[in-house]
Image (cartoon, coloured by chain):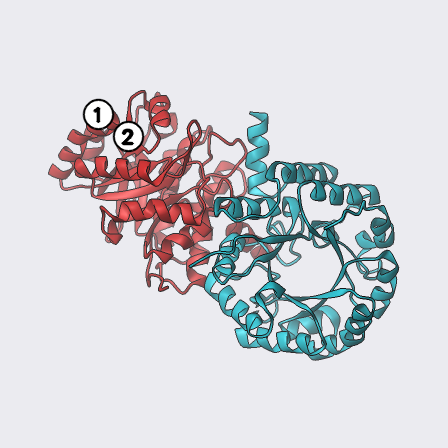
Chain colours: A red, B cyan
Amino acid sequence: MKLPHTVTLVDVGPRDGLQNEKQPVATEHKARLVSLLQDAGLKEIEVTSFVSPKWVPQMGDNTAVMAAIERRAGVRYSVLTPNMKGLESALPTKPDEIVVFAAASEAFSQKNINCSIAESIERFAPVVEMAHAAGLKVRGALSCAMGCPYEGDISADQVERVVLLMKDIGVDHMGVADTIGVGTPRKVQAAMERALKHYPLAEVSGHFHDTYGQALSNIYACLELGIHTFDASVAGLGGCPYAKGATGNVATEDVVFLLNGLGIETGIDLDKLVDAGAFISEVLGRPPVSRVARALLAKRQA
Amino acid sequence: MKLPHTVTLVDVGPRDGLQNEKQPVATEHKARLVSLLQDAGLKEIEVTSFVSPKWVPQMGDNTAVMAAIERRAGVRYSVLTPNMKGLESALPTKPDEIVVFAAASEAFSQKNINCSIAESIERFAPVVEMAHAAGLKVRGALSCAMGCPYEGDISADQVERVVLLMKDIGVDHMGVADTIGVGTPRKVQAAMERALKHYPLAEVSGHFHDTYGQALSNIYACLELGIHTFDASVAGLGGCPYAKGATGNVATEDVVFLLNGLGIETGIDLDKLVDAGAFISEVLGRPPVSRVARALLAKRQA
């Protein structure tokens, strides 16, 4: 089985990583994190989200963050937009891409956003339309694709149904997300294959949480299918609200170590990436969750 | 690619896991850990080592531990024996198997045991002979098979050379160990294929450290080769002396979660395994390193 030659990593640390942080992180520190990620070679960064500050106070400085980041040629900046209002606020900040979302689980959709999956996607239709009119690419984030905290197991059929609904409203890219980290390689491959029935290889990505330590084997399983775009979060930023004390997003450092070992190009300098993670970890006052970061930082001190 | 239907896990927590613990662990707690592992369904347990208590004070109660464990039918108990003196001390305690070892790295062998790889294996020849005469199986542990803290990268050729030397002295089983946790799937497969040239599938096993978070993807890569025996350490017990603060052996809980997800039988009850890990973690006064254990313990408290 041939693996891809190159992989694109989307660092979602500034958005998905920081959004669950209770302590406020200063706008300048968020902008600095984006700079350091760029220094490390990241070419896609999910910067912030335009949700109501009532829901996610941490992202209340979204416009300020977008103004503060130092934009570089060749780097793409995305923002999460939960609705039309979010998009309208996001547009003047000039993102390259927006992210819309839906759950693969009906129970999660109801509990999380008070409507059915179909309704939630329908509401995104005008958002996608306006984003396209503004020349922006639309990434879809399909959460709970392997399992749901309320419903338990999620089938590949359930995943495919939502993939089709998202495709119907014109979503350009399908990010399949194991929000609660319960997926394992063969289950992940089955879900990914459903996304690949409707989207080309370059427009399907994996988003894994390391709550149960399975993220890297799931990424490896995706590589075996040729998938070559993955979300990851520097330092492993991001908790999972359903498993207190457990880890959240897979750490970008850990993914880069895997890809380096497989001889797959990422354009990312692992040492500089560890620097970026060390910076934000110091801001947060705790060590990175990334095992690679911990091991390499310990080596530097040795 | 078809994966194995069943996998045997060897819990090395009581030996490889505890040996680097600075704080002394009471003999009764070690014996209790073995009991709990049996309760959870483990059928192979590496109980202790017969090294000089000057080197590893934690294992100084080896004979007492072997006397204290409650032996059950169908469970195999192994001990590490570094030399003839160790084997002579081990034999009266009636282990089922002994473990002998060598490094794939010449530099590591010299620094660690002051002799060449070939010399170290030659010294094990009478140990293997006497163990066989006593009806014991001999497992070989091939350390530093993916990389060495002194030498860096280790090639598959280097691995195969040591596999052959071990086979020459009659070692029955080849455990290929990524001692410093730097392996990634394709490199691991290349090393494993060399072991499989000289040993049958049932007599090759993988031993992975999670220092860089790569262990589960490496195990998945081994499963793709049909390998169906792995070492693991409950709660992720075991540090790596070369990466302070970094994690050591892959946690048995994490491996079981992976195998359960893949539909592979292990005979292990994950909840009871988490109990075993929680017990020893309480004895050590710190939470388990295992991500699965952390997530499941947090869920129990929720």
Asked if residue A271 lies left or right of residue A95, the reply is right
Mark 1 is surrounded, within 10 Å at the Cα level, by few (under 14), some (14 to 19) or many (20 or more) other residues, namely few
In percent of width and height, residue B102 lies at 69, 70
B228 displayed left or right of A193: right
Q: Amino acid at mark 1?
A: Lys
Chain letter of disc 1?
A
Q: Secondary structure at mark 2?
A: loop
Under mark 2, the amino acid is Phe
* Dot 2 alpha-carbon crowd within 10 angstroms: few under 14, some 14 to 19, many 20 or more: many
Q: Which residue is mark 2?
A: A50
Q: Which residue position holds label 1?
A: A85
The quadrant the N terminus of chain B occupies is bottom left
Rendering coords of residue A262 (x, y %): 42, 63
Of label 2 and label 1, which has the lower sequence position?
Answer: 2
Give me the residue at 15% from left, 29% from top.
A126
Q: Are marks 2 and 1 in contact (CB under 8 Å)?
A: yes
Tell me if residue B176 can be seen: no
Q: Nearer the viewer, residue B43 or A103?
A: B43
Chain letter of mark 2 equals A
